[in-house]
Amino acid sequence: MSGTATTPPAAPPASAPPAPLPNPNTTFQPTVGASSDPATARVDGLVTTQQHGYDTLVRAMVRLQPTLAEEDASELEAAMTLLRDGGEQAAIETGADSYEACLAHLTPTLGADDLSALNGVLTDLRFLANRLRTGDVLPALPDPADPDAPVENGVPTNVDVPYVAQSGTNLHCTMGNWTGEPTSYAYQWQLDGVNVGTDAASYAVTGDDVGKSAACVVTATNAYGSTAAPPSNSVTVSAA
């Protein structure tokens, strides 16, 4: 019996392999003004995270120390010392492992705010360990009382951009969230990009302001210096 030959269906095209995940060490961009030496720039760029972890842990220890068992207090103090004094990559990684084990033991006894703070410190430690390479040494944090301490290491760092909203005839701006424990804030209001108003968190709108785009730039200051946050969101001023 004769028949017509059929052509087998073409095989579906092979799917492309997944793109490799980026290596955090190769995607790291040193901060403006950092050293031109890649190793030095990489380590210098970690100081803000190091300072944030240390400051957070110090504040948590003040709250928790009266209730901590001696062994747990010693583990947290060891992590605090590690963040303050720095060390080689292997020491940071080992310290993060010990801290994580202690945190797992403490978790059932912690309130939500303290647990969030201590988990944030663990994130900082892991970040530092992952960004450092073999042979890198994380330096000790500068002493705020040391007049020779480099001012760029401790200036405030903006975490959440300030937010502007209108209520009645007033615009209000939040300070945003910062690390570095700012001691004061300055507010610069802008209407259609032009500076207006006084150094205050609120701005009283007038009839001439209606329809203009309003935003605010907040500058935070501490003993090390000042940092301006990115401009807030913009709102269109409406009539009261």
Image (cartoon, rainbow, N blue to C red):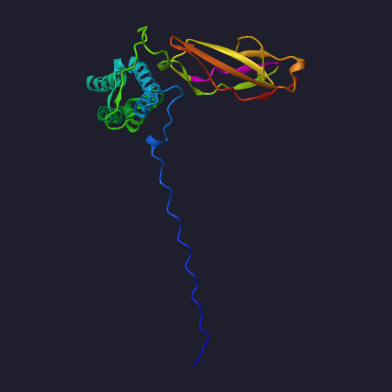
Name the residue located 53 percent from the left edge and 85 percent from the top edge: 4
Name the residue located 48 percent from the left edge and 65 percent from the top edge: 12
Front residue of this view, candidates 41 and 58: 41
Q: Residue furthest right?
A: 207
Does the stretch in magenta take in 175? yes
Q: Quadrant of residue 72?
A: top left
Q: Position of residue 146 (x, y in %)?
A: 35, 8
Q: Quadrant of residue 179?
A: top left
Q: Position of residue 169 (x, y in %)?
A: 71, 16
Does the stretch in magenta take in 61? no
Quadrant where the C terminus is found in the figure: top right
Q: Quadrant of residue 43?
A: top left
Q: Position of residue 101 (x, y in %)?
A: 27, 31
Q: Position of residue 180 (x, y in %)?
A: 43, 16
Q: Residue furthest bottom?
A: 1
Label total for image: 0
Front residue of this view, candidates 170 and 111: 170
Q: Which residues are magenta?
A: 169-177
Placement of 210 over or under 225, stated as above or below:
below
Q: Is residue 110 left or right of residue 213?
A: left
Q: Residue furthest front?
A: 36
